[in-house]
Amino acid sequence: MNRLPQFLACAVLLFVSTSAPAGDLARGVRGKIAAGDLSTGIAQVEDYKRAKGVDAEYLDAIGWLARGAEMLRRPEIAERYVDELRREIPVENKDVLIPFGAKIEVTARLLAAREGRGAALRYLGDELVLAKDTALRSRISKNINLMSLEGREALPIGTADHLAAAPAPLASLKGKPVLLFFWANWCGDCKAQGESLARVWAKYRSQGLVMIAPTRYYGSVGEKDATPAEEKEQIAKVWKESYPGLEDVPVAIDADTMVRYGASATPTFALIDRKGIIRLYTPTRLSESELSRQIDRLLAE
């Protein structure tokens, strides 16, 4: 089955809803592109470059321009900005990871449009091997998963570290539909999903639905660096306070799981059928009605 239409639709949703931090220039460019005004975004970055030159803020903004141009079906403009990012950020650099990731993401989309999904997946796989930063690896995996994860057997979840009871291994849950909710303790969009997710859980748990909520350590609490023990305490606090009704949902804490499932955008959802096959993968928020519809579909099978 061709996954590219869904991949592109999710890309648009991610563009307008991303919670990635951005400076004034990047925020302005994002706003213009979300409104379909690519020309004004280009003018903004050209003015900035003349005034301040090439810096991290500029590179972040042209990363958004590259993504926006590709989504607005202007591949020649997208390629131009990708080429500039290749020149300015030839290798992974922790100070400009967001535009570096944009270069990889847009290159893959351009390859998919020009040469097909296989070429894009090979390119992304090569980049994943080279990537070191956890967030970057998650972002690359997200793009791989958007093209290829649905219809495949569910990927394993690390369960060694967790809150309260350990989640059951996915292999042991065959025969039941499973909802995976990937989240971060600092994520506002995740917390905004909490009430509807609790209603979904209350409705479907008695019908056999299993839910697991994987997350990972990010190395900080608020603006301060944190040890895993300190961050685990914060994860437990946030889960208790911001997700009432989900107290008995197992929370796995595992960076490899978050990378494997491409949870660079939070929340991310994956829905697994009774045979252990992923039927839905979406790195965005989901409405209660859409999530319920997808679960109803699996329960009816």
Image (spheres, grey):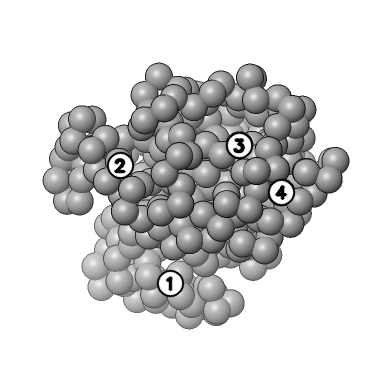
Distance Cα–Cα, label 3 vs label 2: 21 Å
Mark 3 or mark 1, which is nearer to you? Answer: 3
Dot 4 corresponds to which residue?
295
Distance Cα–Cα, label 4 vs label 1: 37 Å
Q: Is residue 116 left or right of residue 93?
A: right
Mark 1 or mark 2, which is nearer to you? Answer: 2
Distance Cα–Cα, label 1 vs label 2: 33 Å
Mark found first going from the N terminus, 3 or 2: 3
Q: Tell me what residue is drawn at x 68 percent, y 56 percent.
A: 292
Dot 2 corresponds to which residue?
235
- Mark 4 surroundings within 10 Å by alpha-carbon count, few (fewer than 14), some (14 through 19), many (20 or more): many
Mark found first going from the N terminus, 4 or 1: 1
Dot 1 corresponds to which residue?
29
Mark found first going from the N terminus, 1 or 2: 1
Mark 3, secondary structure of its residue: strand
Q: Is residue 252 visible?
A: yes
> Pointers 3 and 2 in contact (CB under 8 A)?
no
> Pointers 1 and 2 in contact (CB under 8 A)?
no
Q: Tell me what residue is drawn at x 75 percent, y 31 percent.
A: 274
Distance Cα–Cα, label 3 vs label 1: 41 Å
Mark found first going from the N terminus, 4 or 2: 2
Mark 4 or mark 1, which is nearer to you? Answer: 4
Q: Is residue 86 left or right of residue 172?
A: left
Mark 4, secondary structure of its residue: helix
Q: Tell me what residue is drawn at x 48 percent, y 61 percent.
A: 195
Residue 218 position, x and y percent, is 30, 39
Disc sitting over residue 210 in the figure: 3
Viewer-nearest residue: 80 or 100: 100
Query: Label 1 sits on what residue type?
Result: Val
